Amino acid sequence: MSDGMDFDYETTQTEGGLLAKLWRTILVGTNFIRTRDQLVNEYVRKTDMLKGRVKQVSRKTKSTLTKNVNANEMTWKVFIDLLFNFITVKKIDISIKLTMSNGKETLHSLSIVNTAEETK
């Protein structure tokens, strides 16, 4: 890719693979130009600063973070952590549109606020 990010875009067809694919879509859609190493270094620096101020923040090593960022599958915990702490999102709005077999559609939404951003 020309943006400096060398992500492997292969994901598995599992729930974790779906989150990994969504994560990569978000990274491309937010147009990050910086290299992965710069993003990783910034994330590690931020978690070092937050450690002790925000209870749920734990320091990640560069190797763990690189593994999470490039994973073919990820958990919701990793996905939310990367959004809030790696690309510093203040709030996430998740919406799911369901289309039933009878054609009826329903929309379900929720919001998650980054409490670490509120304490700054």
Image (cartoon, rainbow, N blue to C red):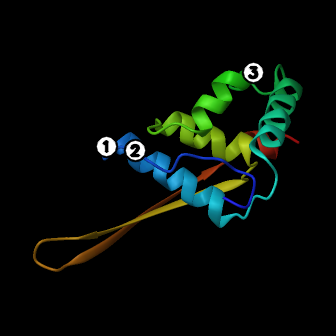
Q: Residue at x 58, y 33 (%)?
A: 68
The alpha-carbon separation of the residues under discs 2 and 3 comes to: 25 Å
Mark 2 belongs to which amino acid? Gly
**Secondary element at image label 3:** loop
- Pointers 2 and 1 in contact (CB under 8 A)? yes
The alpha-carbon separation of the residues under discs 2 and 1 comes to: 5 Å
- Locate residue 31, reporting x and y percent: 72, 64
Q: How crowded is the residue under tag 1: few (<14 C-alpha within 10 Å), some, or many (20+)?
A: few
Mark 1 belongs to which amino acid? Thr
Which one is closest to the eye, mark 1 or mark 3? 1
Q: Is residue 29 above or below residue 104?
A: above
Q: Residue at x 70, y 63 (%)?
A: 30
Q: Is the N terminus in the top left, top right, bottom left or bottom right quadrant?
A: bottom right
Q: Residue at x 74, y 25 (%)?
A: 62
Tag 3 residue: 59
Tag 2 residue: 17
**Secondary element at image label 1:** loop
Q: Quadrant of residue 73?
A: top left
Q: Along the line of sight, which residue is nearer the eye, 9 or 87?
A: 9
Q: Is residue 95 visible?
A: yes
Q: Quadrant of residue 52?
A: top right
Q: Is residue 63 left or right of residue 11?
A: right
Q: Along the line of sight, which residue is nearer the eye, 40 or 109?
A: 40
Q: How crowded is the residue under tag 2: few (<14 C-alpha within 10 Å), some, or many (20+)?
A: some
Tag 1 residue: 14
Which tag, 1 or 3, sits closer to the chain's start? 1
- Pointers 1 and 3 in contact (CB under 8 A)? no
Which one is closest to the eye, mark 2 or mark 3? 2
- Locate residue 44, reporting x and y percent: 81, 29
